[in-house]
Amino acid sequence: MEVLVDVKNLKKYFEIRKSLFARPVYVKAVDDVSFQIQRGSIFAVVGESGSGKSTLGRTILKLIEPTSGKLVYDGKDITNLSGKEMLQYRRQMQIVQQDPYNSLHPRKLVKDIVGEGLKIHLKMKPDEVYTHIKEILELVGLREEHMFRYPHEFSGGQRQRIAIARALVLKPKFVVLDEPTSALDVSVQARALALLRDLREKFSLTYLFITHNLAVVDYMATHVAVMYLGKVMEIGTKDDIFLRASHPYTLALLDCVPTVGTGRKIRSVPRGEIPNPTKPPSGCVFHTRCPKAQKICQEQEPAFVEVSPGHYCRCHFCA
Amino acid sequence: MRRGSLLDISGLRVIFHTYRGTIKALNGVELWLNEEERLGVVGETGCGKSVTALSVMRLIEQPGEITEGSIWLNDKDLLKLSEEEMDRIRGKHISMIFQEPIAALNPVFKVGFQVAEAIAHSQGITIKDAYPQVREALEMVGLDWQRTIDLYAHELSGGMAQRVMIAMALAVKPKLLIADEPTSALDVTIQAQILELLDKLVTVSQSAVVLITHDLGIASEFCDRVAVMYAGNVVEIATSEEIFSQPLHPYTKGLIDSIPVVGRSKELAGIPGVVPDLVDPPSGCRFHPRCKEVFDKCHTELPSLSQVKPNHYVACHLYQ
C-alpha cells in the first residue's frame, strides 16, 4: 500500500510563562510522534483528554506550526511550506471539527459556508458553485432548500453533515475527523458514522479519525494509535490493538469501556489521574498509573519496540 | 396502586413556558423503585431524564411547572409538601450528584466548608460541629483530606470534584441517590474509578440509586433495572439483562442497534428522523413519526405503560 501521510518525529511544544520574566515551561502536546498513514485507510488516534490527539491532527494539517519533525504529504515535504505554498495542499487536506455548534459561522448561510472553499480554491462562477453545493448536500443527506438557511436552524446531526459537506466539497484526499460524532446522540451518531464510511468509499478518501470512544474506533478504523501525554504508546492495525494489545495503557482503556449485557465486570482500573502535562512523570509517562510498573519504568523511557510487523509498543515489558 | 416501596412516580407532567410556546417536557412519566434498588434511566438529549430527576428533588422552577402527577417517597407525596418540609427531605433522604462536578460546587468556598455544610444541613447541627465528620467523608471517597479540605473547586480535577460531590451526597446516608450523568464529563479511566467507588459506597450506605445516563453500557453494568425514556415518556422498563437481550419497544431496539460495541462488529442501524420538538409534539405515540412498525392507532392514541411479562413493562400499541 502506498503511503499518503508520513509523520516523522513530529513535536509540538507549547510555551507557558507564568509572568513575563519567569522561565518558560513547555507542554509537550505532541512529543516525537512518527507514523505513516496508508492511502485509503482510516487511521484512528485514541486517547483521553490532554493526550495531544487534537493537537496532532491540527499539526499534521499545519493549522498550527510544528516545533520540529517532518511532515510528508503524498511524497512531498510540506513541513516548511509557507502559507501561500500550502494553499494548493489545503484543497486536498480538510478537517471536520468536534462541535457542530461552534464550528459553523452563525451568520452565514449554508451555501456560503459550504461554497467558500470553491470560491477560494477553484475560482468558480456562482452557477457552478451552486450546482456543486447542491450535489454535495444531497450526498450528505441534506436537500437543496437547506442552502438558504442558517446553522441555528439545524439539529446537531444535520450541522455535522454541513461540516462534512464543507470538508468534502473540494474533493480532498485526506480528511482529519476530530471527534466528529462526540456531540451527537447515539441514534444520530450511527447514521453519521455510516455516512462517513460511504463517503470514504465513494471518494476514496483517507481519514485521520480522532476520538476518545474505543467502540467507535472498533467500528471505523483500519489502523489505531493510542496516545498518552503527548506520546504514542502503541500503534498497529485494528486487530493488533483490539485483539493483541500489549501496552498496559491500551489494555486498561479497553477494560474500562462499559458494555451492554456483560453484567458487572471486574476490571483493573488504572489508579490515580492523568498527570499535569507541564510536569510529566520521569521515565515512562504512564508509570504513575501502571499496574505493571517496576523501578526501571521510573528511570528509563522505554523504546518504541516492534512486537510484530507494523505493531509497535512503548513499554519495557511488551516484548 | 403503589408499585415501588421507596419511590413511586406516576402521571408526572412538567411544562416549560418559553417565548416559542409551551414545551411539554414530561408527558405522564411512570417510574418506581424499591429500597436499595438501582434504576438506570437512559435516553437521548431532551427525553426528559434530567427533568424527571429535578422533579423528584422539587427543583423545577419558573418558567417550569409541574402540572400533574404524584411522586411518593415512602408515605409522603413530595408534590404536596411545603417548601420547609421538602427542605428537610433534600440532602437528608434524597441526595443528588450532577454531570459537571466543578460547576456544581460553589466556587467561592473551600471544599471542606462545603462538605461540612452538607453534613450540618442533614443532621441539623452547626457547620463547626460538622467539621470532624469531613475527614471521614473525604477519606471515604479516596481523597487526601488534609490537602483537599483547603482547595477551591477550580483547583480540583474533574474526577476529584466528582469525588467531593459523592462525599457530600453520601455522607448523609440517603435513602435515595439521584446521579445525573455522573461520569459523562470524565475520561474513561476516571469514569471507571468513579463508578467503582459509587458501587462500593451505595452498597455500604444502603441507598437506592436512580442513575441517569446516555451510556447504555453504564446502565447495563451498574443497574438492576433500566427505564428507557423518549420525548417525555418512559417507553420501556425491564431488568438490565432483559432490556438488552429482549427489548420490545421499537425505540429501545433502535437505540441498542445504534451503539457500537468493542469486539462485536455489526452494522449500526441508527434511527431515521430526529427527536421531536416538544413545543409541538407528535400526536398519539410521540415516537410514531420515526417508528418502523407504526400503524393507525399510533397516530391518535398515547400508549400507556403496561406489564407484558413479570418485571417487563412497555408503552407500545404492538403489545396491547
Image: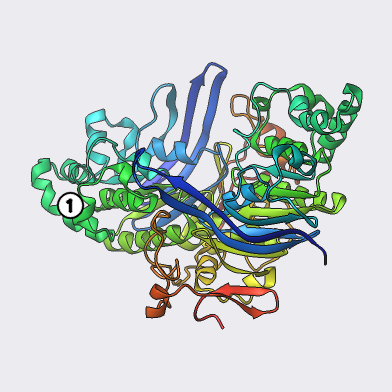
Quadrant for the N terminus of chain A in the image:
bottom right
Q: Is residue B179 left or right of residue B141?
A: right
Q: What element carries label 1?
A: helix
**Hey, which quadrant is residue A293 in on the image?**
bottom left
Q: In this view, does B90 lie to the left or right of A220?
A: left
Residue A179 visible (yes or no):
no
Q: Is residue B215 left or right of residue A139?
A: left
Mark count: 1
- In this view, A167 is above or below B193: above
In the picture as drawn, the residue positioned furthest to the bottom comes out as A319
| x then y, percent, for residue A63 | 64, 42
Q: In this view, does B177 lie to the left or right of A232?
A: left
Amino acid type, callout 1: Val
Residue ID at (17%, 45%): B116
Quadrant for the C terminus of chain A in the image:
bottom right
Residue that mark 1 sits on: B134
| x then y, percent, for residue A125 | 90, 24
| x then y, percent, for residue B100 | 41, 43
Viewer-closest of B67 and A53: A53
